[in-house]
Image: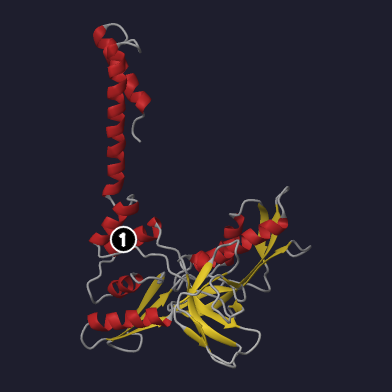
Amino acid sequence: MSETYESILSRMQDRFQELAGFPADDASDIGIRLKVLAGELFSACTNLDWLKRQVFPQTAQGIQLDYHAQQRGIQRKSAVRSQGTLEFSREAALLYDVTIPEGTVCAVSQEEGLRFVTTRKGILKAGDFSVSVPAASEEGGAQANAAAETIKVLVTPPPGVTAVTNRDAFTGGADGESDEELRERVLESCRNIPNGTNSAFYREFALQYEGVYSAAVSPRARGTGTVDVYVASRGDVPGGEVITQIQNDLNALKEINVDVQVKGAEKVSVDIILYLVPKAGYDYSELKLLAEQALRDYMGGLSIGESVYMTRAAAVVYGVEGVEQCWPEPLLCHDVAVQSGQLAVAGTIGVSPKVEDEQ
């Protein structure tokens, strides 16, 4: 804000005193008028400052940034639901089939409120004890991912079913695109203008799909007239349906006699083991959990082709409040150079207390 209400009112009162030869009393008609006018001028200045921030994509926010993106043919990506499989079971076999309706709701726990719904109807055959049914989280976002064997609550239990679980993790959930992430895409599209044939075109085209966090393009990857497009989500690769959709859409737009292949990035597992010393007054157990989550967030934010450096990993941990000192285990983890078309993903992430003579 260029000016405050107080500074505007003070300038008006000083000018009045300069012209009239006496100050305006706060309770007088002119004193009240000056305050009202100062308030209106302050409101106008505030609106102008807001407008100046929204004029350019470098500082625009919210819906105004969306409008800048739309001028570049870019849409903000919504949150993506996690996907997985639920296993419904019963203790004793029945003589008849049991239907698991589409939309059956299950949850991680009644306290956490993270719920999942079946996306197709399932049939638990007569004589069988269990059946697996595809499902997805009710809401999108990274918090919708669930570890294996954690979905145990039947919210809307089908008759004849007594238990539910997920043998494998629910993955693929991703947060909606933030202002900063959308802003970077808009500015990148201005720096490298897609023309329908260059790498920027293929990259920007792939990035518009839900669940695609980063993309890389390899021209002439398989010889003249070939293009390989690699896509990745946060810390993983998108599902086959997303890759197939991008492939089909690019086939309709690509140049004549160009062979385009869309692929999930090759995952490279990276282990990060750090030693940690807490500051006085901080609990090590709590810092350990916060530090490990910070490392997972760091790995999840890497793009295709972005290498992993232990110094950066240590810097991430130093950013956790309460960390006095940390350093990588030299025998178990090291810098990992990631090639184009590869994505570094979290392997073993661990934080250990200080061990004497380890530094």
Residue at 52%, 64% (x, y): give it.
143
What amino acid does circle 1 point to? Val
Residue at 27%, 13% (x, y): give it.
30
Across and down, in percent, residue 333 comes to 63, 72
Q: Can you see residue 254?
A: no
Residue ranking furthest to the top: 21
60, 139: nearer the viewer: 139
Which secondary structure lies at badge 1? helix
Q: Is 49 situated above or below 275?
A: above
- Structural crowding at the residue carrying mark 1, measured as other residues with C-alpha within 10 Å and reported as few (<14), some (14–19) or many (≥20): many
- From the image, which quarter does the N terminus lie in? top left
Q: Is 139 situated above or below 283?
A: below
- Residue located beneath label 1 in the image: 186
Specify whether 350 is left or right of 154.
right
Specify whether 255 is left or right of 183.
left
Across and down, in percent, residue 292 comes to 62, 64
